[in-house]
Image (cartoon, grey):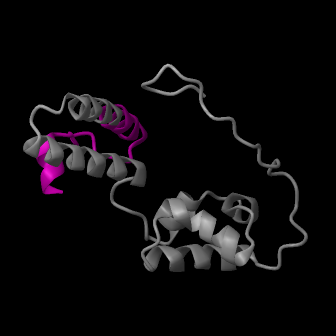
Amino acid sequence: MARLHARRKGKSHSNRPPLGRSINWLNISPEEVSSLAVKLKNDGVPTSSIGIELRDKYGVPGIKYVTGKSLVDVLKENNVQDAMPEDLMNLLTKAQRLNRHLQVHKTDRKNRHSLELVEAKVHRLSKYYKSKGILPADWRYKSVIAQLE
């Protein structure tokens, strides 16, 4: 996939095996995997790192392979999901950092352009999450709101 705001090609990725295969060598039941995911989330591990921790510490190849559900669905069933999706929250904190930097260094044009690109990503991603019903329809991004959150 190509880069969003650059004229370069993207990275190639390895393909995961198809979901239809049964995992005979795994000794953990789907209930144990989902309880481990909930425990990690309650311990404060970000959603994007839970799969990596399960892979490295417990030998789980993927949550969806074992449970048949995605990590977000497992967390939603157990009521431990975040109020805002993690990727959108990361973009908001990045925009907040850039905004703080620009308040000190007012003539930094490179960071002003970076802030514009990040805010474009925030608007695009929030539009997607509104259409999926994950964010409320009246949610709006403003740089003042990002400073308060």
Q: Nearer the viewer, residue 56 or 140?
A: 56
Q: Nearer the viewer, residue 45 or 141?
A: 45
> On the picture, is 121 further left or further right than 57?
left
Query: Is 123 rendered above or below residue 134?
Result: above
Image quarter where the N terminus lies is top right
> On the picture, is 130 further left or further right than 144?
right
Image quarter where the C terminus lies is bottom left
Query: Is 93 rendered above or below residue 6?
Result: below
Q: Position of residue 148 (x, y in %)?
A: 12, 55
Q: Nearer the viewer, residue 126 or 147?
A: 147
Question: Hey, which residue is sitting farthest right in the picture?
Answer: 24
> On the picture, is 106 further left or further right than 69?
left
Q: Position of residue 70 (x, y in %)?
A: 61, 57
Q: Main secondary structure of the magenta part?
A: helix
Residue at point 68%, 71% (across, down): 56
The residue segment tinted magenta is: 122-149
Residue at point 20%, 31% (across, down): 112
Query: Is 130 rendered above or below residue 66?
Result: above
Residue 48 among magenta residues:
no
Q: Position of residue 144 (x, y in %)?
A: 10, 45
> On the picture, is 88 further left or further right than 141?
right
Q: Is residue 31 visible?
A: no
Q: Position of residue 4 (x, y in %)?
A: 46, 27
Residue at point 60%, 78% (across, down): 36
Q: Is residue 52 visible?
A: yes
